[in-house]
Image (cartoon, helix red, strand yellow):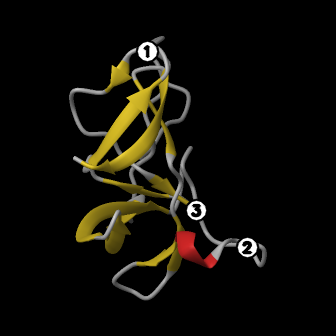
Amino acid sequence: MFDPLPRSGALPVNPPRDEPTHELRTLVIELDGVLRQVPGRYHRTGRLTGRLITAAHFRGSCEIGGERPVPVRMALHRPRASTDRRLIVLDDLSTQWVMSFATCHDHRFYKITGFY
């Protein structure tokens, strides 16, 4: 049985989960004329609820440090009525997502400039 308030003084543990907190998805993304399939995770719960975060497949550039020497991830969100159609991509379930070219890695903001 799960006890949310342990008596031993230890920090409470997370309750057991019956379902995973994310779903694996595959996106088809075109950048600068290059078309690639990129894996990602759609988050159903937690801090990133409603977002799809790709695997690290993108080149990032920062004002302070220049180009990042390793690939970065892209965070995508659901489109609104006013969203520019050129920014919308589809996943393997035909769900629409909006590409975001701003990302954060190691507490620095990066602009995605292309595929790594």
Q: Which residue is mark 2?
A: 80
The residue positioned 39% from the left and 45% from the top of the image is 113
Nearer to us of marks 1 and 2 is 2
Q: Seen from this angle, which residue lies furthest bottom?
A: 94
Q: Residue at x 42, y 44 (%)?
A: 112
Q: Residues within 10 Å of mark 2 (few under 14, many from 20)?
A: few
Please state the horizontal and vertical placement of residue 10, each as a whole percent of the image: 43, 15
The reply to whether discs 1 and 2 touch (Cβ–Cβ < 8 Å) is: no
Q: Looking at the image, is mark 1 or mark 2 earlier in the sequence?
A: 1
Marks 1/2: CA–CA distance: 44 Å
Q: Earlier in the sequence, mark 3 or mark 1?
A: 1
Number of the label disc, if any, that sits on residue 10:
1
Amino acid type at mark 2: Arg
In this rendering, which labeled residue sits more in front, label 3 or label 1?
A: 3
Of the pair 19 and 43, the residue shown nearer to us: 43
In the image, residue 2 above or below residue 51: above
Q: Please rate how many residues cluster around mark 3, counting C-alpha atoms within 10 Å: few if below 14, some from 14 to 19, many from 20.
A: some
Query: Of the residues shown, which amino acid type is indicated by label 3?
Result: His
Q: Callout 1, which amino acid?
A: Ala
Does the image show residue 97?
A: yes
- For the residues labelled 2 and 3, say whether their Cβ atoms are less than 8 Å apart: no
Mark yes or no: residue 24 visible. Answer: no
